[in-house]
Amino acid sequence: MGKKKEPDYEAELVQEYEHWEYLKEYGGSDPFYDDATNMNLTRNHIIYARKQLEEQYGQDFNKYPEIYFRELPPEVERGYVARSGEIRDRAAEVLDTYLSDANFQYLLCNREHLDKKEAEKISIDNVLKYVSGLAAALKKDDLITMRRHVLGPESYQEAFAECAEKVKHMISEKKAEPSAQIKGCQMTLFQMGLETGLSR
């Protein structure tokens, strides 16, 4: 067996400092945690690599890489999300896109044609909640939820399309006429809390 390669703590420090700066300016794509959480985790990686260098070189500071002497990044207060203003603006645009999506509108107007078992089988209520959830996130200023939609609105729209096809198939099998009553759809939008996205 070959000799195990020693960790390159200098390279790790360079990488972790760059990652911390990137998160600070541009933010990450973590679907559940704010940038502060990941920035502080990266800070802990920096602390660990520095300690490893201290164990390796002790008091012989001439052997320490220059990056070791760089100032330790500060701890970041919980809740920080980079480019928050941009995320809010883009999330509002995404919500409008969802609301005008033909498949979403179809689901909204035809939900009443499904019984409880059918609705549960295709998870239509969960799909509809993608939109009401984004509307609620805008209202509560939940940047993490907003960012999920901003970074991947296409996946949610694909879910609308897939669910709509399933509903069409179910309705076709029952020989029911699809509902197209705009008044009913508007009431459902109101009940879902989506008026928050329409009244900006």
Image (cartoon, rainbow, N blue to C red):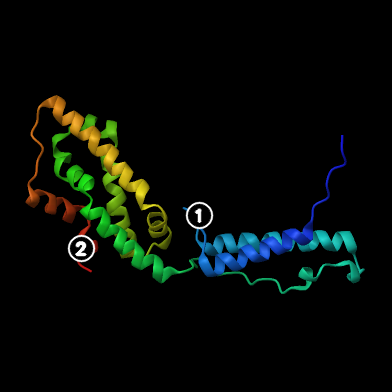
Q: What element carries label 1?
A: loop
Which comes sooner in the sequence, label 2 or label 1? 1
Tell me: residue 193, above or below residue 5: below
Q: Quadrant of the N terminus?
A: top right
Q: Indicate the amino acid at tag 2.
A: Leu
Task: Residue at the far top: name it.
Answer: 173
Tell me: residue 59, above or below residue 183: below
Q: Indicate the amino acid at tag 1.
A: Asp
Which quadrant of the figure has residue 53? Answer: bottom right
Q: Quadrant of the C terminus?
A: bottom left
Structural distance between the alpha carbons of marks 2 and 1: 28 Å
- Nearest the viewer among 78 and 114 is 114
Residue at 32% across, 42% down: 159
Residue at 92% across, 68% down: 60
Identify residue for label 2: 198
- Nearest the viewer among 96 and 192 is 96
Task: Residue at the far right: name it.
Answer: 60
Q: Is residue 167 left or right of residue 50?
A: left
Residue at 18% across, 43% down: 106
Residue at 79% across, 62% down: 51
Q: Is residue 59 left or right of residue 163?
A: right
Few, some or many residues within 10 Å of mark 1 (<14, 14–19, 20+): few
Tell me: residue 5, above or below residue 196: above
Mark linked to residue 136? none
Mark linked to residue 30? 1
